[in-house]
Image: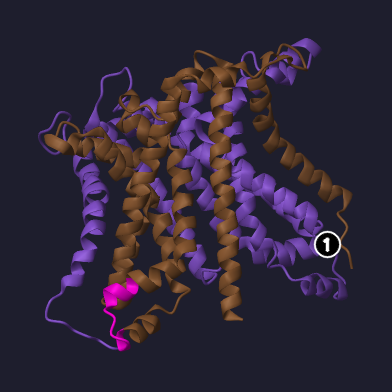
Chain colours: A purple, B brown
Amino acid sequence: MTKTKKNTKLYLLALVPFFVITFLFEILPLINVVIESFTKTGGGGFTFEHFIKIFSTRLYQQSIFNSIWISVVSALAGILIAFLGAKAANAASAKVRNIFTSVLNITSNFAGVPLAFAFMILLGNVGILTLIGKNYGISFLADFDLYTINGLLLTYVYFQIPLATLLMLPIFSGLKKEWREAVGLLGGNSFHYWFKVAIPSLLPSILGTFSVLFANSLAAYGTAYALLSNNIALLPIRISQQYIGEVVQNQEFGCALSLVMMSLMVISILITNKFQKRTGGAS
Amino acid sequence: MKIKTHFGDALILFLVAAFLVVPLVLTFFYSVFTEWMDILPTGFTLNFYVEIFSDGAFINSLLRSIIISIIPVVICTISILLVLYVITLYVPRLEKYVEILCNIPYAIQGVILAAGVISLYSGKPGFLSNRIFLLVGSYCIIVLPYIFRGLKNTIGALNVRCVIEAAQVLGCSKLHAFFTIVIPQMKRGIISTMMLAFTMLFADFVVVNMIAGSAFRTAGIYLYQTMSKSGQISSAIIVILFITTLIISTLTLMIQNKAVKSTKRREA
């Protein structure tokens, strides 16, 4: 490495745009969120009142619980379906696999408000499947209520599947044929192969995928907002409500809620990093 | 040996694909029929598309979406290229810190970023509380991790220091060499990274809804407002937005595949 040290450090000017942007829109807002969440509403002294309110009010307890619940369940469902899908795609012919991957790539763009709308015309109060269910007496279609947390869960599972499967496909191609043959030679069957060899070797990558999916649905907002507007106890909805919406706005309280949500995000990221380090950053 | 697809595998793939495709296809059908009260829709029409394309407000919102997605991507890409210039040629140890700054946005996705930016700047004097300014800034942060990773991988595939040293021997300055030799070589990587970032911002709803709301109606906001008025027009808007995204992401994939092929060829 040649170090040509010049008298002028003019090249440092090239760093200015990057540091101005990150300082103004990342660092300062981040510091401000932390400070304001310990500030009394409307400015003034230090307080814990926002966090006391969050952890003692039913609505906010429920919001934290629902956010974690929907993220965990949709991530698990996404992983299970992605596992089956990736396993099948891995065993299928190249042509079938390519078509399947194209479907995943295309539908991975379908999320947010458009996704909520698609489910409304499918399973909403006058949705197509709901009407068919009513006309033909299929009760689980007729009685399906999209505008509940379970209905929302279905839309979350929808957007997890393409992402999860696209993350799992390359993991599956890492399974070697020889392993299966070795299990067979040692007298094992396909149950032994999957539960003693394949799944344990995939596990770190699966856990990494899980926390990507967890963060993905924790931060999701458009689908829930379009489907239920402010009528659901969910962290992102309760945060945005402190800034827009019909109730009295409380920016300091919004910051405290954001800090809670951010902690959940950071925990899931730390878990991802831990598993990726253990596998040598393979995924 | 030709691999045949087993029936069980085919069934799983079909069911997963069907679950993913049905809502999408139904949204499309919904936009081209006037009524849907039983299994099959009736009254084929393209009137909803005619209506939406003759609506100036929608066209404007679409243009707003495109412009507000392009500007932050360009700003962010240039800033990161400049940083990579300094990292690769002058201060390699800076990379660690830049990497941290580029990973923080993962933890402050969507609603948290918007909440942080509004809490800090709303009510501040001058341009700082300008909603468009705040939106552009926040959008830069949203795409920061993806642009940084994309450009870093692209520059990592080239032997920059060698190229620059060769250029210096021939009497070219580092800066000049970087912008006339290295960056043109990164062209494909830069373009595909920018397009990926563009589709992310183009699909944004949460940040624009919280920071600008109806003050800056992008196509996403326009769609949200139309949903309560007309189902069919909403589905037509969704189809238009979806096809736009699809075209861009297909082009991105094509460029990326070509880039991979050309680096492979260079290695071979």
Please tell me whether mark 1 sits on a helix, a strand or a loop: helix
- On the image, the x and y values in percent for residue A237 come to 40, 29
Quarter of the image with the C terminus of chain B is bottom right
Along the viewing direction, whichever of A72 and B25 lies nearer the viewer: B25
- Residue A255 drawn in magenta: no
Along the viewing direction, whichever of A238 and B41 lies nearer the viewer: B41
Query: Is residue A270 rendered to the left or right of residue B51?
Result: left
Quadrant of the image occupied by residue A9 = bottom left
**The residue stretch that appears in magenta:** B168-178
Quadrant of the image occupied by residue B169 = bottom left
Classified by dominant secondary structure, the portion drawn in magenta counts as helix
Query: Is residue B233 rendered to the left or right of residue A127?
Result: left
- On the image, the x and y values in percent for residue B72 come to 34, 47
Mark 1 neighbour class, 10 Å CA radius: few under 14, some 14 to 19, many 20 or more = few
Using the image, determine if residue B208 lies above or below residue B162: above
Name the residue type under label 1: Ser
Observer able to see residue B93? no
Residue that label 1 marks:
A190
- On the image, the x and y values in percent for residue B221 come to 42, 26
Badge 1 sits on which subunit? A
Observer able to see residue B71? yes
Along the viewing direction, whichever of A209 and B42 lies nearer the viewer: B42
Quarter of the image with the N terminus of chain B is bottom right
- On the image, the x and y values in percent for residue B267 come to 57, 80
Query: Is residue A273 rendered to the left or right of residue B125?
Result: right
x 43%, y 21%: residue: B56
x 75%, y 16%: residue: A133
x 11%, y 81%: residue: A7
Query: Is residue B149 rendered to the left or right of residue A34?
Result: right
Along the viewing direction, whichever of A72 and B223 lies nearer the viewer: B223
Using the image, determine if residue A28 lies above or below residue B78: above
Quadrant of the image occupied by residue A134 = top right
